[in-house]
C-alpha cells in the first residue's frame, strides 16, 4: 500500500469547518517500500486467521493514545511536541483506505484523548482540555480549547494523564506515581503512610462539562493504583477498568528475600475493575501471579511470602511483569468474530523476561462481565526474536481505538507508526 497525496492536500486547499478554517497539508509519511527498511511491515504482524494488518501512517513521532471519529478521522496524541504541536488529525479524504491529509493542533504534549458527547477531550501532563466538534466530529476551533482541569501533579516520571469518560458526565484521569515504590530517600524503607497517595498513584474523577476545575475539585475515585496508563469505561458493564504498571526492583535493597530473577519476573501487571473508594494496594502490597496472592511489599515488612491486603481489591487479570500495558479498549464493533464482542484489547509496549515476549496486543474475552484467560492477539511488532535478538526493537504498541467500521487501530510510540487491523471471513 502506497501512501499517496491527494490533489486537495497537494494544493493546500482549505477545509471549511462550522467556524474557523482548517488547512490540511500533505502527509510526509514514507511509502511502504521505504518503511520495509525497518524490517517490520504490516504483513509481518502475526494475527489469528482471517485478520490482516496494514500500515496507514508512519514516522509521526511519539504517538500515544488515539481516538477515531464516526467519519473515520483519526486524532492522535503525542508525548513529545512535533513542530510545536501535540495532536495529529489524520484524514483519508477520498476514502481509499490511505491517509492522505494531516493537520496538527494543540501546543502541549500528553497521552490521553477521547471523543464523547460532541467534544474531543485531550490531556496534557498537568490537565485536560476539550474541543467542540461539529456533527461530523471535526474540531470547530482548534486554537481555543476549553480547559477542563488544571494543576495535576507532574514530576516528570510516569506523568501521563490518560482519560476515560462515563455516561453520567464524569471524566476519569489517571495520576501516576512519580515514585516506583514510595521508599524514603536513600533507604529501602517505605514511607508510612505514603504521602504521594494524596496527589498521585490513583484515579481522580472530575466533571466532564465544568470548566477551569483544579485538582481540589476532583474526587479521588480509586487509590493504590501505581500508574494506570490503560483506562476505559465499558458501557456493557457500566464500569471503569484500568491496566496498571507494576513496581520495579526488589533485590537491590532486599537480596535476602529476592534475586535478580525475582525482580525480572515480579510483580504482575494487572487489570482492575474500579469502583469509587477502591484501593489497589500500591505501594504496600503487590500481586504475585505465580502464587496468585497479594504479597506484602518488602519496604513494609514483607519477605516475598507474607500475604497482605485484606481490604485491597483483587485484579481481574494478572499479566507477566514489566510488559507495560499502555492502553486498553473494550471492543463493541461488528467486524470481528462474535467472540471478540465486549472483550478487552490491551497494548503492551515492553517485554517480559518470563515469557521472552512483548511489544504485542493481547485480548481478554469477557462473558457476562467476567474475564476469561488472556491471549496474544497481535504479535511481532518488535521485529526481532526476543529470546535471541538480532536487531533493535522496531515498534512498541501504545494506543488503541476502534474505527467506525469495527477495525482496530494500534499506535506505536517508538517510531510513530499507525497500524489498522481488519477481519475478513474466508
Image (tube, rainbow, N blue to C red):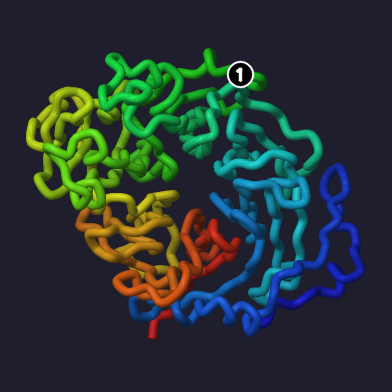
Depth check, front residue: 183 or 422 = 183
Quarter of the rendering occupied by the C terminus: bottom left
Where is residue 177 drawn, in percent x and y? 42, 30
Answer yes or no: is residue 418 visible: yes
Mark 1 highlights which residue?
Answer: 213
Relative placement, left or right, of 283 versus 113 is left
Q: Rate crowding at label 1 as few (under 14), some (14 to 19) or many (20 or more) other CA atoms within 10 Å.
A: some
Q: Is residue 370 visible?
A: no
The x and y percentages for residue 166 are 46, 35
Quarter-of-image position of residue 140: top right
Number of marks in picture: 1
Residue 132 position within the rendered picture, expressed as x and y whole percent measured from the top left: 71, 38
Task: Judge by depth and name the residue closer to the eye, 75 or 152.
Answer: 152
Q: Quadrant of the N terminus?
A: bottom right
Residue name at image x 70 percent, y 70 percent: 29
Whether residue 73 sits left or right of residue 219 in the image: it is: right
Given residues 130 and 214, the one toward you in this image is: 214
Q: Image point 11% across, 33% down: which residue? A: 303
Tell me where residue 302 sits by quadrant. top left
Local SS, label 1 = strand
Who is closer to the viewer here, 181 or 71? 181
Up the image or down, 243 lies above or below 282; here it is below
Task: Please identify the quarter of the rendering in which residue 35 is found.
Answer: bottom right
Where residue 209 sits in the image (x, y, percent)? 61, 26
Q: What residue is shown at x 12% (from left), y 27% (from top)?
A: 308
Amino acid at each position: 500500500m502506497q501512501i499517496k497525496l491527494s490533489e486537495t492536500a497537494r494544493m493546500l486547499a482549505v477545509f471549511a469547518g462550522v467556524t474557523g478554517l482548517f488547512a490540511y497539508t500533505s502527509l510526509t509519511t514514507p511509502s511502504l517500500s521505504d518503511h520495509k527498511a525497518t524490517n517490520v511491515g504490516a504483513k509481518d504482524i502475526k494475527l489469528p486467521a482471517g485478520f490482516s494488518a496494514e500500515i496507514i501512517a508512519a514516522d509521526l513521532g511519539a504517538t500515544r493514545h488515539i481516538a477515531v471519529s464516526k467519519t473515520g478521522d483519526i486524532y492522535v496524541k503525542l508525548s513529545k511536541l512535533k513542530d510545536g504541536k501535540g495532536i495529529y488529525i489524520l484524514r483519508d479524504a477520498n476514502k481509499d483506505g490511505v491517509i492522505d491529509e494531516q493537520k496538527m493542533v494543540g501546543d502541549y504534549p500528553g497521552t490521553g484523548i477521547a471523543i464523547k458527547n460532541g467534544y474531543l477531550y485531550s490531556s496534557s501532563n498537568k490537565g485536560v482540555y476539550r474541543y467542540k466538534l461539529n456533527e461530523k466530529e471535526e474540531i470547530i476551533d482548534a486554537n481555543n480549547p476549553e480547559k477542563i482541569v488544571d494543576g495535576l501533579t507532574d514530576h516528570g516520571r510516569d506523568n501521563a494523564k490518560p482519560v476515560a469518560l462515563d455516561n453520567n458526565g464524569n471524566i476519569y484521569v489517571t495520576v501516576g506515581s512519580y515514585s516506583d515504590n514510595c521508599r524514603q530517600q536513600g533507604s529501602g524503607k517505605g514511607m508510612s503512610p505514603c504521602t504521594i497517595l494524596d496527589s498521585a498513584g490513583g484515579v481522580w474523577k472530575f466533571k466532564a462539562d465544568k470548566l477551569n476545575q483544579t485538582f481540589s475539585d476532583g474526587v479521588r475515585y480509586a487509590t493504590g493504583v501505581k500508574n494506570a496508563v490503560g483506562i476505559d469505561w465499558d458501557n456493557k458493564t457500566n464500569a471503569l477498568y484500568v491496566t496498571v504498571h507494576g513496581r520495579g526492583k526488589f533485590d537491590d535493597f532486599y537480596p535476602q528475600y529476592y534475586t535478580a530473577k525475582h525482580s525480572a519476573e515480579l510483580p504482575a501487571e494487572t487489570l482492575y475493575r474500579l469502583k469509587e473508594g477502591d484501593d489497589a494496594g500500591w505501594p504496600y502490597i503487590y500481586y504475585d501471579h505465580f502464587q496468585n496472592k497479594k504479597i506484602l511489599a518488602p519496604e513494609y515488612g514483607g519477605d516475598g511470602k507474607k500475604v497482605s491486603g485484606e481490604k485491597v481489591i483483587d485484579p481481574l487479570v494478572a499479566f507477566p511483569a514489566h510488559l507495560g500495558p499502555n492502553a486498553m479498549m473494550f471492543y463493541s464493533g461488528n467486524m470481528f468474530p462474535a467472540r471478540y464482542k465486549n472483550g478487552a484489547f490491551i497494548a503492551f509496549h515492553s517485554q517480559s523476561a518470563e515469557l521472552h515476549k512483548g511489544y504485542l496486543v493481547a485480548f481478554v474475552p469477557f462473558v457476562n462481565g467476567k474475564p476469561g484467560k488472556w491471549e496474544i492477539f497481535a504479535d511481532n511488532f518488535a521485529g526481532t526474536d526476543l529470546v535471541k535478538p538480532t536487531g533493535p526493537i522496531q515498534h512498541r504498541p501504545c494506543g488503541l481505538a476502534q474505527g467506525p467500521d469495527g477495525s482496530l487501530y494500534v499506535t506505536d510510540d517508538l517510531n510513530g507508526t499507525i497500524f489498522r487491523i481488519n477481519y475478513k471471513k474466508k
